[in-house]
Image: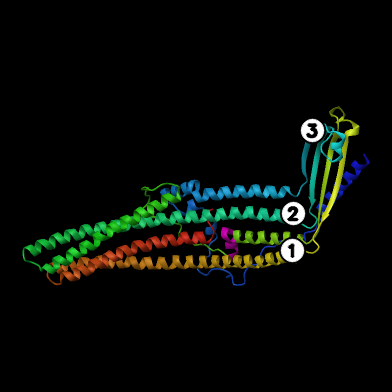
Amino acid sequence: MHYTRYYIFIVLAAALALGTGCMVGGKYSKPAPLSQAPDKYPQLSNTADSITAIKWFELYQDTVLQRFIRTALDSNRNLLAAAARIEQSREIAGIVKANLYPQFGYSANAGGGTAGNEARKIGGGVDGGSFKMYGTLNWEIDLWGKLRYNNQAAVAEYLGDIEARNALVVSLVAEVATQYFLLRDLDNRLAIAERTLAARRSGTEIITQRFLKGFTAEIDKLQSEQQEALAAALIPNLQRQIIITQNALRVLMGMGPGPVNRGDALFSQVVNPNIPAGLPSQLLERRPDVRLAERDLEVVFNRLGVAKAGLYPSLSLTGILGFASPELGALLGAGGFVANGFGGLVGPIFEFNRNKRRISQFQYQVQEVTRQYEQTVLTAFADVDNALAQYRTYAEELEVRKAQVVAARKSLMLTEAKYNYGYSSYYEVLIQQNYLFDAELAESTTQQLKINSLVFLYKALGGGW
């Protein structure tokens, strides 16, 4: 029993060492904000609420779009794969954490045999029985923080996978909205092209009748046919783009190719137009890709700690507690009791600078990942500024496009009247038709780009998840 008390003393001493062990690599701290970061964005209005607090279903009012986004969040294959990666990382973190604690096991065996005297002299066999039953303990004492650094690195990787999924959610919501608004733009441009084609066909019929009666020249008829063909050629082009966009939406929702439903028309879309104040500090706190970059830095920092702890000796405890006897009947008696405990110390002496080079490698990796983190932050600031500029300029451009459409429509009406009374050539009518057609198409595209600029801003601010 004296050895049992000694064994217990070793275990208690090891537990004390585990609680007071130092971490030779220091403690991770969050990177300081970049000096190049703007204090605030002048384009943002000074309102109380923040767009980063708005949920995607509050930002996008179209119920069909809301249903598409929900379907994508439930069924997108990349998002499902990211969720599986999170579960893997959580289990790995649990495995690594278990290394901090003692490992208990058991061992039992029984057997025996017969061997003559001469055979036993050369180890040729065992004469008799052997019965053993042990409980085992193995424990590496984390004196220098190696196991704790490994644990913190695994936890940071797990949290990084969560941020990677959050970043994917932001991108997925934005991509579904972008593709949907593009689809409504294509639908609107197709309607413009079909309406224009119908008007030009009617005009071609009138010009043809006038030509046949000798009231107009053949050149007018040919020019009218060209204009009709231009509108007709755009229709299959737009139909092709619609099919491609529909399939892109369905892939995002985890579906095969096919048509999709429509909700509000392009110019009926209601997207929250208020761009409230948002500071860079808020941006850093919300953007998942920035958080992911910081987690990557934390992982490498802890790997550096593991490398530094490798310069110092490792203390481990092993022990067995059980019974052993040559006879099964005497196995559980006092004479068969076994209690052994051992402590081991292993450390490097001379390894041709292998450990030092490993430390140097991780130090350079910390520098690399730090620069990547800073690049991610700078990109985030630029994304917000770009999205703000896009929204402001597209809003201004849309007002000009609307005025252009009104002017082109009135100009065409007056030019057609002048032609009908013989005060202008048909060529002038064709020019005004093209002006109106191009203006209507440009107005539709600008409306889509204006709406999508809000999508980009919402994504840049890290919202939607």
Q: CA distance from mark 2 to mark 1?
A: 17 Å
Among the two numbered marks 1 and 3 on one chain, the one whose residue lies closer to the N terminus: 3
Numbered mark located on residue 355 in the image: 1
Q: What amino acid type is highlighted by mark number 1? A: Asn
Q: Nearer the viewer, residue 326 or 317?
A: 326
Q: Is residue 79 left or right of residue 136?
A: left
Q: Is residue 21 left or right of residue 177?
A: right
* Percent x, y of residue 213: 6, 63
Q: Which residue is mark 2?
A: 147
Q: Decide: few, some or many residues near mark 2? Use Cα within 10 Å; few <14, some 14-19, many ≥20.
A: many
Q: Which residue is mark 3?
A: 110
Which residue is found at the position 48% from the left and 46% from the top?
75
Dot in front, 1 or 3: 3
Quadrant assignment, res 397: bottom left
Residues tagged 1 and 3 counted as in contact (Cβ below 8 A): no
Q: Which residues are magenta?
A: 280-290
Q: Is residue 438 left or right of residue 357?
A: left
Kind of element beneath mark 1: helix
Kind of element beneath mark 3: strand
